Amino acid sequence: MIMEKIPPLFDFDTMPEPETFSNGLTGQDIISVSQFNLEKLRYIFERAREMRELVERRGSADLLKGKIEAALFYEPSTRTSASFIAAMERLGGSVIPITQGVQFSSVSKGETLADTIRTLEQYADVIVLRHPKIGAAQVAADYADVPVINAGDGAGEHPTQALLDLFTIREELGHVDGLRVAMVGDLRYGRTVHSLTRLLRHFDISLRFVSPEILRLPLTVMNEVIDAKIDVRETHDVADVIENVDVLYVTRVQKERFTDLAQYEEVKNQYEITPELMARAKKKMVVMHPLPRVGEIHYSVDDDPRAAYFRQVRNGMYIRMALLAAVLGKA
Ligand code: ASP
């Protein structure tokens, strides 16, 4: 009997290559904002605008159908974890969430980060990691073959937050060059401040840092700003800057980073943005906050059209959709 040749289900030799492009991000880990030059920023922002249009018109797509993200959060998170899930699902992918439930995973049995990462990459195409230690995302990336995205490493960096912050500034004010940006609050431990400051070095801007003495910007970051020849000043008082800023970037004092809680108590309520303060600010400016807020912005500021923090939250989803698509090689 002559056997009929059964065609293979998939012919890997003739299958077209998945759609890839030269954005320099495909297959890459996202650990620090220092990986982003102007070209990459422009690329991600253009894609984020397309993602916004996609969500507004159709809600979702299947660009990442069949792709799986492992979301591993060793620290609390609302926006970052939810938006990484929403981003993946709106693009047709799915998520293994080891987020608020990390205490129910083998991490609580003493498993090392390296082993957890090497396990998750057996299932997932990309790993999103938040961890309390500076440098943890890099360690994970060293172990993983799939891309690792840093969703906050202790008081180190929070690159995806900085991308969405910069995107928000650009969308709200139409440009970045020429702006005066003030960062207020915990500049020492605030990782979003570190990442955003580093990204802003690509632009012709001036920076004002407003903090209590013990929460000043770390010297390493300050030196990078000085090396970039950016006009920079520090003060303890928001009143010194409020009249002349285009962006007021307010942050929470990072209680979880203090070893001495008495010190936290001393500085925790130092700043509050109120309608009275806003009355002295420019007509065209924005107030931003990475959130959560714990008293730094009075609720009555929320109705002010310059309060951009919830629009900022939404932008986070578009930026993470763009980033996931780029890292996973889908235009
Ligand atoms: N959500 C931001 C972060 O994870 C800001 C904060 O927690 O204060 O860094």
Image: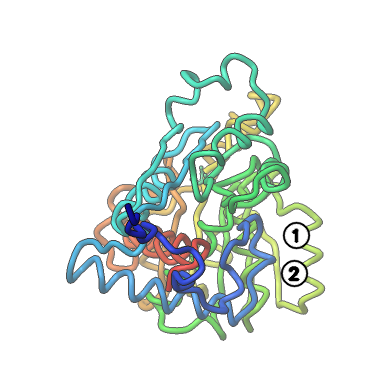
The one nearer the camera, 118 or 84, is 118
Q: Position of residue 110 (x, y in %)?
A: 64, 17
Contact between labelled residues 2 and 1, with CB atoms less than 8 Å apart: yes
Q: Residue furthest left?
A: 57
Q: Position of residue 74 (x, y in %)?
A: 55, 31
Q: Which residue is mark 2?
A: 225
For disc 2, does the CB lie below 8 Å from ligand 1? no
Side (left or right) of 82 relative to 25: left
Side (left or right) of 17 relative to 208: left
Q: CA distance from mark 1 to mark 2?
A: 6 Å
Q: Which residue is mark 1?
A: 221
Q: Secondary structure at mark 2?
A: helix
Give the position of the C terminus as an image quadrant: bottom left
Place residue 168 in its image quadrant.
bottom left
Q: Position of residue 34 (x, y in %)?
A: 69, 66
What's the colour scheme? Answer: rainbow
